[in-house]
Image (tube, rainbow, N blue to C red):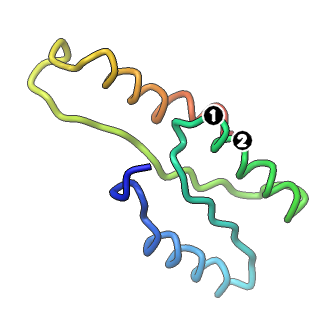
Amino acid sequence: MQESLLEHDEAAETRALVEQASRRAYLHAGDIQDADHRRAPVRVTVGVFGRPDILVNNAAHQVCCDASENNSDEERERTLRTNIHAMFYLC
């Protein structure tokens, strides 16, 4: 996974806010394009908490270009895996 995808500071801040509200949080860093990664947080959450109450799915991929035909097939696939497919699998 690319280091630029990791947002540990923001995740830690969110966790702290959740815990300040006397609740528990589970953080799972990784690349949601990967099917195994998408399954892992659900399994762990159910194992630790019994069921998920809230899912904060804060990930997206976007590349700016002057025309859609300038995006490669690989870029389109990455965008769909991250922005569309992962949402269905995680929810």
Q: Amino acid at mark 1?
A: Ala
Residue 40 image offset from top left, x and y in percent: 72, 48
Residue at 63%, 44% in the rendered image: 37
Q: Secondary structure at mark 1?
A: helix
Instruction: Tell me: 66 left or right of 48.
Output: left
Contact (CB < 8 A) between labels 1 and 2?
yes
Which residue does the numbered mark 2 point to in the structure image?
39
Residue at 71%, 52% in the rendered image: 41
Which residue does the numbered mark 1 point to in the structure image?
35
Residue 18: image quadrant is bottom right
Residue 30 image offset from top left, x and y in percent: 54, 52
Residue at 23%, 35% in the rendered image: 63
**Circle 2: is it few (<14), some (14-19), or many (20+) Cα within 10 Å?**
some
Instruction: Tell me: 58 left or right of 79.
Output: right
Residue 67: image quadrant is top left
Instruction: Tell me: 28 left or right of 47.
Output: left
Residue 7: image quadrant is bottom left
Residue at 38%, 29% in the rendered image: 79
Q: Quadrant of the C terminus?
A: top right
